[in-house]
Image (spheres, helix red, strand yellow):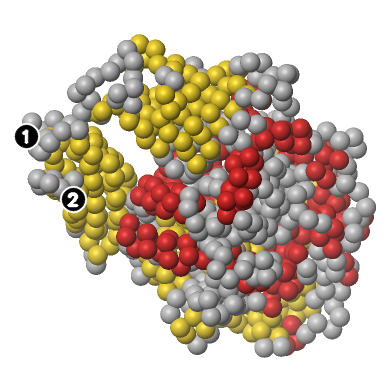
């Protein structure tokens, strides 16, 4: 059997530039890890996530670094011994016992070096030297010539996590290091070289296709033995061939579904490589397999052309969010952290995470957690917001990287699409790249329309590939059209207010977003300004978007008053973010017959920052998280403009029809009923959005600055206001509150005396580790709501202080 020895102990790190006299000659190093984390662990740099410390770390990415370790070896003529590096970041030279093994140029690949003839008995010295990414980038720019890039740094000229060089939500922390495990593998006779596994449905049956190749040390006859769900298949490698292909059929398996539709049964697949004569086990491969089908419908229709994911023959509306690397230093994202983040996404009614192209192919732990959670995954190839040379050596690196990662990730049931790039075709078409990129100069299109689709068709034919996001399906149509393909909406936020979302009915919106600061506890943990203000040094440094703070204030215009204090600024911008995204999602979902997906930018953060995220870097839920939970509810009731009036729109993504009466009232804010109505025996079928026009006397505005409409369908409720909050005569908030101890924390019960709009309990201001189950709750006079708070700290009613812990739109309007 193949032997695998981890090489994760005894590493040291040194800087190769003697000019930095403040560094020790050598420090202990953690593998997997990176230079920044080793310097931080040895107290040689301040935490770059705090205050403005990021800028004190700029020098790290401009230096060369060397990792060293010693490990025991034992030469054996009967075995092949190989050093395997799962991830090297990025430009590295590997030396064993003074002899160079090779050089690497790609963060996203696995590298394997035969050291059979180079191992010594006893101690062996392994040295990995990383060259500055900036220095290599300058060399590559001289080689390729300039290519436009929307962000600083040479990320488009090498195969490294692009957002390392800074983004409009991320710091510039240019890493180097052994960021994934390294090991010594010893094997004899034969080993599995590449194992490609795909699973789908074939009618009522599950079909697993296995394509495997081996690497041989001698001519021993070998066979593969594959088993799944009681089905066994033996495939022998015939003389002169090192590859086999076969299928296993599982009769009537349980089907894998996205979490909002069904269960996620997973079947263990075991593939064993055995000696065909002795039956000795030589190598093995195992995965958990889910059976489901997937296709992407892009057929022409009366609206243009579709962009609809069809899972198990069901056309779905996907409720999604974009996923960025969860830490600037990915090696410290644990399997448990992946599970926690994905469970948070699932709890927010998200059923798709789009792994964005400026980051990384995540570790297996991420996709395994998505398989178990029923979380669909859209995987970008790693090209984002830049033009990319298509010449060597980059082209060869791209091809090798794609092969590595497609083969690694293709068994996962959660993965439903490969996407060629993020915004690069759009950038070429609309961002002023055309005059810069002369005729005959490559910029990446050959990857998206030729290299990538060919590799996907060869390696993973059961899963769809799409050239880009946004993209309209052909270069003959502008890439961000409403009527075709997938769309990004970024004039909203960048240039105009969120009410403009209703100007668009895209076929599928794969990016749209709105900014807000992280939660208060996260700000206090990461910034030590005294006082904290939106423009104090630390707070402002943790805002990376161009004119981001100005856009936050501009986005309040027409909706909420300009805040006058830090507390008001923090809540107003968080509330506005939540409302903007809820507004957009409900609009898109109400047009389900045309639009088949809303993927919010973004779900998570990589460090404490003012950003578009719903979950901040500490894992705390922003108000946006709760807005997404509400707007992505599989059964949504919303009030939308239709045919010069208003309609209640029921949207049903459940497997059962939704039948109930719709009742509604037009009310004064003090609770006085002006008019009432009911619709009886109304039916919204599964996977349907159905609109019910409201009576004219209910929906007519009449400049009603103290009125609203409330519509109810079973336990779902929707509100409509005739004017924005800035013009709405919201009363000063009046309520009673009681606090009851529970096993997990407290139940905090509010009873409204006055009308309360978007009531929020900011529990992180009571306990940084506290979690509340709900937020953005609107109560009519006399109504009550219970917030369920999970915390280990003691809480009393006196702690629920208005203006900090307790917030609602009323106090923004009445107090500023």
Q: Is residue 425 left or right of residue 765?
A: left
How far from the left and from the top, in percent, is residue 40? Answer: 66, 25
- The answer to whether residue 762 is above or below residue 690 is above
User: Residue lying furthest left in this view?
Assistant: 277
Q: Is residue 744 visible?
A: yes
Look at the numbered disc 2 and give the secondary structure of its residue. strand
| Residue 2 vertical position relative to residue 783 in the rendered view, above or below | above
| Quadrant position of the N terminus in the picture | top left
Indicate the quadrant where residue 135 lies.
Answer: top right
Question: In the image, is residue 733 above or below residue 645?
Answer: above
- Between 387 and 598, the one nearer to me in the picture: 387
Tag 2 residue: 244
Can residue 766 be seen here?
no
Q: Between disc 1 and disc 2, whose residue precedes?
A: 2
- The structure residue drawn at horizontal position 69% and vertical position 76%, both measured from the top left corner, is 502
The residue that label 1 is drawn on is 277
Distance of label 1 from label 2 (alpha carbons):
18 Å
């Amino acid at each position: 059997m193949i032997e695998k020895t981890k090489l994760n102990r005894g590493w040291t790190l040194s800087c190769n530039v003697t000019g930095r006299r403040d560094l020790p000659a050598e420090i202990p190093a953690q593998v997997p890890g990176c230079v920044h984390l080793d310097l931080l662990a040895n107290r040689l740099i301040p935490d770059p996530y705090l205050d403005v410390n990021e800028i004190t770390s700029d020098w790290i990415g401009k230096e060369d670094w060397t990792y060293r370790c010693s490990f025991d070896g034992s030469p054996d003529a009967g075995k092949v011994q190989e050093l395997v590096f799962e991830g090297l970041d990025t430009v590295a030279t590997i030396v064993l016992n003074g002899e160079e093994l090779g050089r690497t140029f790609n963060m996203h690949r696995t590298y394997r070096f035969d050291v059979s003839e180079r191992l010594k008995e006893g101690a062996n010295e392994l040295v990995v030297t990383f060259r500055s990414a900036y220095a290599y980038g300058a060399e590559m720019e001289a080689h390729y010539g300039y290519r436009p890039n929307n962000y600083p740094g040479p990320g488009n000229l090498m195969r490294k996590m692009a957002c390392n060089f800074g983004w409009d939500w991320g710091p510039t922390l240019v890493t180097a290091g052994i960021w994934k495990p390294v090991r010594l593998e010893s094997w004899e006779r034969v080993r599995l070289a590449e194992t490609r596994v795909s699973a789908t449905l074939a009618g009522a049956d599950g079909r697993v296709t296995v394509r495997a190749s081996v690497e041989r040390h001698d001519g021993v006859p070998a066979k593969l033995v594959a088993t799944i769900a009681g089905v066994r298949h033996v495939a022998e490698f015939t003389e002169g061939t090192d590859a086999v292909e076969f299928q296993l059929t599982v009769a009537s398996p349980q089907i894998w579904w996205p979490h909002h539709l069904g269960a996620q049964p997973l079947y263990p697949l075991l593939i064993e490589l055995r000696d065909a004569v002795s039956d000795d086990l030589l190598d093995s491969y195992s995965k958990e397999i889910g059976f489901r089908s997937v296709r992407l419908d892009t057929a022409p229709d009366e609206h243009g052309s579709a962009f609809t994911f069809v899972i198990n023959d069901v056309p779905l509306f996907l409720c999604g969010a974009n996923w960025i690397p969860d830490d600037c230093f990915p090696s410290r994202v644990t399997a448990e952290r992946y599970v926690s983040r994905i469970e948070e996404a699932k709890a927010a009614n998200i059923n798709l995470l789009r792994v964005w192209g400026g980051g990384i192919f995540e570790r297996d732990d991420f996709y395994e957690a998505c398989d178990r959670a029923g979380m669909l995954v859209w995987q970008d190839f790693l090209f984002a917001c830049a033009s990319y040379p298509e010449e060597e050596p980059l082209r060869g690196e791209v091809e090798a990287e794609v092969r590595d990662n497609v083969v690694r990730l293709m068994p996962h049931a959660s993965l439903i699409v490969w996407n060629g790039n993020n915004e690069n075709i759009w950038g070429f078409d609309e961002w002023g790249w055309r005059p810069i990129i002369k005729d005959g100069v490559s910029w990446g299109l050959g990857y998206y329309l030729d290299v990538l689709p060919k590799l996907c068709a060869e390696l993973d034919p059961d899963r769809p590939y799409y050239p880009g996001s946004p993209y309209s399906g052909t270069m003959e149509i502008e890439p961000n059209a409403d009527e075709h393909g997938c769309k990004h909406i970024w004039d909203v936020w960048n240039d105009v207010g969120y009410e403009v979302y209703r100007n668009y009915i895209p076929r599928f919106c794969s990016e749209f977003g709105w900014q807000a600061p992280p939660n208060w506890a996260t700000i206090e943990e990461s910034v030590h300004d005294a006082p904290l203000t939106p423009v104090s040094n630390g707070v402002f440094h943790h805002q990376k978007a161009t004119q981001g703070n100005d856009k936050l204030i501009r986005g309040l215009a027409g909706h909420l008053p300009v805040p006058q204090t830090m507390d008001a600024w923090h809540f107003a911008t968080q509330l506005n973010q939540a409302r903007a995204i809820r507004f957009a999602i409900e609009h898109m979902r109400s047009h389900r017959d045309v639009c088949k997906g809303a993927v919010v930018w973004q779900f998570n953060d990589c460090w404490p920052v003012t950003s578009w995220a719903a979950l901040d870097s500490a894992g705390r839920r922003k108000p946006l998280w709760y807005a997404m939970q509400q707007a992505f509810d599989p059964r949504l009731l919303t009030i939308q403009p239709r045919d010069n009036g208003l309609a209640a729109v029921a949207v049903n993504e459940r497997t059962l029809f939704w039948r109930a009466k719709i009742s509604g009232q037009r009310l004064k804010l003090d609770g006085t009923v002006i008019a009432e109505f009911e619709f009886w025996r109304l039916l919204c079928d599964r996977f349907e959005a159905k609109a019910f026009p409201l009576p004219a006397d209910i929906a007519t505005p009449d400049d009603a600055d103290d009125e609203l409409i409330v519509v109810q369908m079973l336990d779902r409720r929707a509100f409509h206001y005739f004017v924005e909050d800035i013009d709405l005569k919201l009363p000063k908030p009046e309520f009673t509150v009681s606090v009851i101890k529970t096993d997990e924390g407290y139940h905090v019960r509010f009873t409204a005396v006055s009308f309360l709009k978007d009531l929020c309990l900011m529990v992180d201001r009571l306990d940084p580790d506290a979690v509340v189950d709900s937020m953005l709750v609107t109560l009519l006079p006399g109504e009550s709501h219970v917030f369920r708070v999970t915390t280990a700290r003691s809480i009393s009613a006196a702690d629920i202080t208005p203006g900090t812990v307790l917030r609602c739109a009323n106090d923004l309007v009445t107090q500023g």
